[in-house]
Image (cartoon, rainbow, N blue to C red):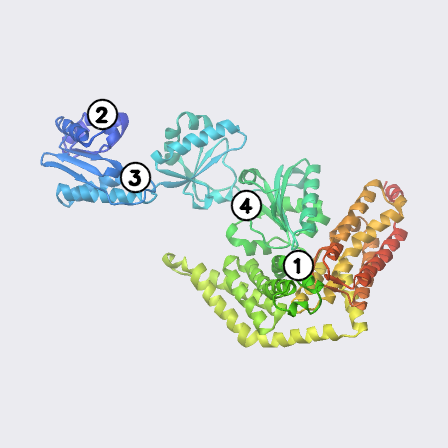
Amino acid sequence: MTRLRSQCPCIIFDSSREALVAGLKAAPWLVKPNRRELEIWAGRKLPELKDVIEAAHALREQGIAHVVISLGAEGALWVNASGEWIAKPPTCEVVSTVGAGDSMVGGLIYGLLMRESSEHTLRLATAVAALAVSQSNAMKTLLIIEPGLGQARAYLAKTLLGAAAPKAHLDIIDNPNDAELAIVVGNAIPADTSLNGKKVFLGDIDRAVQHPELFLSEAKGKAHTYTAPIASASAPAKGPKRIVAVTACPTGVAHTFMAAEAIETEAKKRGWWVKVETRGSVGAGNAITPEEVAEADLVIVAADIEVDLAKFAGKPMYRTSTGLALKKTAQELDKALVEAKPYEAAGKASAAQESGKKESAGAYRHLLTGVSYMLPMVVAGGLCIALSFAFGIQAFKEPGTLAAALMQIGGGSAFALMVPVLAGYIAFSIADRPGLTPGLIGGMLAVSTGSGFIGGIIAGFLAGYIAKLISSKLKLPPSMEALKPILIIPLFSSLVVGLAMIYLIGTPVAKILAGLTHWLQTMGTANAVLLGAILGGMMCTDMGGPVNKAAYAFGVGLLSTQTYAPMAAIMAAGMVPPLALGLATLVARRKFDKAQQEGGKAALVLGLCFITEGAIPFAARDPMRVLPCCIIGGALTGALSMAVGAKLMAPHGGLFVLLIPGAITPVLGYLLAIVAGTLVAGLAYAFLKRPETELAAKAA
């Protein structure tokens, strides 16, 4: 600096600590320490403003022409040969003090170059510094600490680096998508596609702990642009050792948990670490933590509905259905090793369609998502209506009575919402949140136009695809992009869907639904028996698969038209497979091994709860005998249920719905239908079943 003064006398100097003390000895033209730095130079505390002014004059006596002291929230002080000035900063919210001092220096230089007065220049510099503290100017930085370095050391490194980050003009964040710099503390940079194109620095944990400020300075200077290596397809036998999985089905009951158990069992057989998160009817169970996601080599998603997977962004992911995960677990895990692709959170819908061969196609998945959200509404509403009928079929017509209140809750509210919820969440599955508003509006219009659940399904798909089209095709300036999800997409998609429902779709679909309802309610015994047999057979064809779910969705949709008989046949037939196979293990005990006998007891309980999936272990082991027996038994039960005129107000719950008065009528005829189908299927399989000892001998 001394040599520089001979060529340029007007040197402006701003530094800290030892460098500041050394630089002041060279007597630059202008210095800008803060109060704390001035105290270090003076060797004493400066609690009052007069003490600061006195120290500033002491600096001037050493040959420094201009002394500017930043006082934080109190503003700034300028002392030179012409006098003393104090500038107060404007009131503002302090977001980050990083860069405030540099901003003040910039303001001083600008004022001096423009030949402004000292007073005006100081005010300008103070205002610029205030603007700087009201926003974050630090580089957004992702801190990654490699697992296995020890919890204590990792915590210490994270704490020390976090404390040193503001001084290094770094802002530690958690979202890799927003990061400008990634600092990896460990032995290797993870093969993470979310780091592609970002500046990445790899450093040692010991240096990070011992010299955190120097470590961060090196990270900023030596970081290089990173490209994640393309992972080669691994042989199944050399697959990843740590996997996480998510399971979800429309009802959030049987398939969700049985698929989770199957994945856990198969993974543990292979010696893998595994954790499965179940997205069931009561929310996420056994939730996967961010740390477990970071450590995972592979993510498996076995879901029949759309689920939120944002936390897995950048991880290799394989998507399948709960049915395949349950029935072909080993094959699906092998395919996952080869076919997994990095997941991008923004492409939820496309990711679902790129997952290879699936048991359920895209449209089917969207429909089941809507059904899964609608189902609790239907169950609650149906049971409230049943409780109202317990006081008498016409009791709800008496105002002010409990029966009237129950009917208002069930029929007037819950059932009124079921079609809008169905449509809304079909659209949500297709277009995410932008699709929800037009979907709900389209569903309400389906109710008001009389097009019912058929109109709701059409409105849901129309709303979802229109919202998705607007979202992907409409390009706006960055300043207006925020208007898309809150104004443009809801407004225009709702207008298109609403006008289409009112002028094009509502009336013709209402006529179709009215015709279907009239046919179902007035059809003769022969047609009713045939319909019941078809629905019953469908329920037992794949036990929770697409055919089963199609029949179930049909029955649930008819509840919105107060058509209750098909739903009764559907639930009765769905109970037959597990009950029949449980019965077979009791009747022909010697033909089953110990594990199958225990499985039969569990199947009996699951059957009583209307969980058809309880029969899947038997069907997977012996499909050529189990499936025909169950289909025949289910068809018989469905036919008998329709023949006796059974009606069911709630679409789930099994025989436990009998605890609600009026939920099932007539009770005796309904029970006889279930017993008949169970006996036929159970005894048939008990007769056809080959003893396990014979099968084992043949296999050997």
Task: Determine if residue 506 is in view.
Answer: yes
- Three-letter amino acid code at the position of disc 2: Trp
Q: Position of residue 462 (x, y in %)?
A: 55, 67
Query: Does the CB distance between marks 3 and 4 fall below 8 Å?
Result: no
Asked which secondary structure carries label 3, the reply is loop
Using a 10 Å C-alpha cutoff, classify the residue at mark 1 as few (fewer than 14 neighbours), some (14 to 19) or many (20 or more). Answer: many
Using a 10 Å C-alpha cutoff, classify the residue at mark 2 as few (fewer than 14 neighbours), some (14 to 19) or many (20 or more). Answer: some
Q: Which residue is mark 3?
A: 99
Disc on the earlier residue, 3 or 4: 3
Give the mark count. Answer: 4
Q: Quadrant of residue 57?
A: top left
Asked which secondary structure carries label 1, the reply is helix
Figure check: 188 above or below 128 = above
Q: Nearer the viewer, mark 1 or mark 3?
A: 1
Query: Does the CB distance between marks 1 and 3 fall below 8 Å?
Result: no
Q: Which residue is mark 2?
A: 41
Asked which secondary structure carries label 4, the reply is helix
Disc on the earlier residue, 1 or 2: 2
> Could you tell me which quadrant the N terminus lies in?
top left
> Could you tell me which quadrant the C terminus lies in?
top right
Q: CA distance from mark 1 to mark 2?
A: 76 Å
Q: Position of residue 566 (x, y in %)?
A: 73, 66
Task: Determine if residue 543 is in view.
Answer: no
The image's mark for residue 23 is none
Query: Does the CB distance between marks 2 and 3 fall below 8 Å?
Result: no
Figure check: 432 above or below 530 = above
Q: Which residue is mark 1?
A: 379
